[in-house]
Image (cartoon, grey):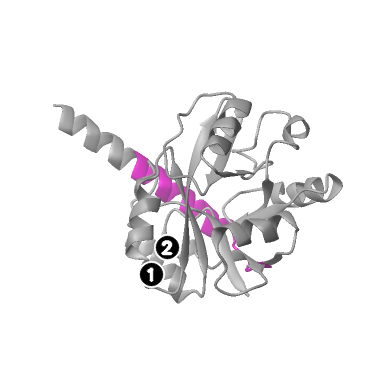
Amino acid sequence: MMNCDFHIHTGYSFDSNSSPKEIVDKAIKEGIDCLGITDHGEVKGALEAMEYAKGKPILIIPGIEVKSKEGDILGLNVKEKIPNGLSAKETIKRIKERGGFVVIPHPFGLFCKFRGNLKELIKEIDAIEILNASIFGNGNEIAKKFAKENNLPFTVGTDSHFPNFIGKCYLEIPGENLSIKEIFERIKKKEGRIVSKEVSFFEKAIDHLRRNFVKVQKYVGRKKRKI
């Protein structure tokens, strides 16, 4: 079996200050075999993680989280930046042109839900995220129901911005030492099994406060550099 977390951020995201090294080391410690590094609008964290993970017992899938006009979209197996602010269909098109695997993350999250018409995109996306360890409300339950009703492949991601959430949930995929292509094939066949540990409201609240603190820190830092 391979334990896979397809939604992770590093300090290359505007709301994280975790180094790719920290993230990879914690994932290995928690028994994660495959990690999708999906920074907001950036791929440098994924590329750095891939380099650091060489020779280590973990597979890094490079990726990016793009903010389309309708909401966030993950591009897995993408090594080039894709601009924010495009339509969902254009964002998906650009991910596909780069050989990427398209996932809609936290589609029904309380504060981060996808605002477009998901049913119109079913034939264009590869999967939806049905378990995100970081969101509030019942969005995960709605996502699971939506995936089942529409016979959609699914992924799981902690949406970790710091090492502490890594290992809280993952998708257990049958096989060992699988390639990225083989993992995607198994996702499309819906062969993964969800594994999850409870994350309390308090843990999530602290995590989001920490993200906001990092945002402010980085914003102030940029302002000082411009002076």
- What residue did someone put label 1 on? 25
- Residue 90 within the magenta-colored segment of the rendering: no
Q: Position of residue 147 (x, y in %)?
A: 78, 48
Residue at 57% x, 64% y is: 4
Image point (36%, 67%), residue name = 54
CB of mark 1 within 8 Å of CB of mark 2? Answer: yes
Residue ID for mark 2:
163
Q: CA distance from mark 1 to mark 2?
A: 9 Å
Nearer to us of marks 1 and 2 is 1
Q: Residue at x 46, y 33 (%)?
A: 82
Q: Position of residue 9 (x, y in %)?
A: 44, 51
Residue 193 in the image, given as x and y percentages of width and height: 71, 67
Residue type pointed to by label 2: Pro
Q: Does residue 90 appear left or right of residue 191 in this picture?
A: left
Few, some or many residues within 10 Å of mark 2 (<14, 14–19, 20+): some
At label 1, the amino acid type is Asp
The stretch of residues the image draws in magenta is 195-215
Q: Specify the quadrant that holds the N terminus.
A: bottom right
User: What secondary structure is the magenta-colored segment mainly?
Assistant: helix
Q: Is residue 150 left or right of residue 191?
A: right
Q: Secondary structure at mark 1?
A: helix
Q: Earlier in the sequence, mark 1 or mark 2?
A: 1
Q: Is residue 192 left or right of residue 51?
A: right
Q: Nearer the viewer, residue 121 or 17?
A: 121
Instruction: Count up the numbered dots.
Output: 2
* Quadrant that contains the C terminus: top left
Q: Left of 106 or right of it: where is 190? A: right
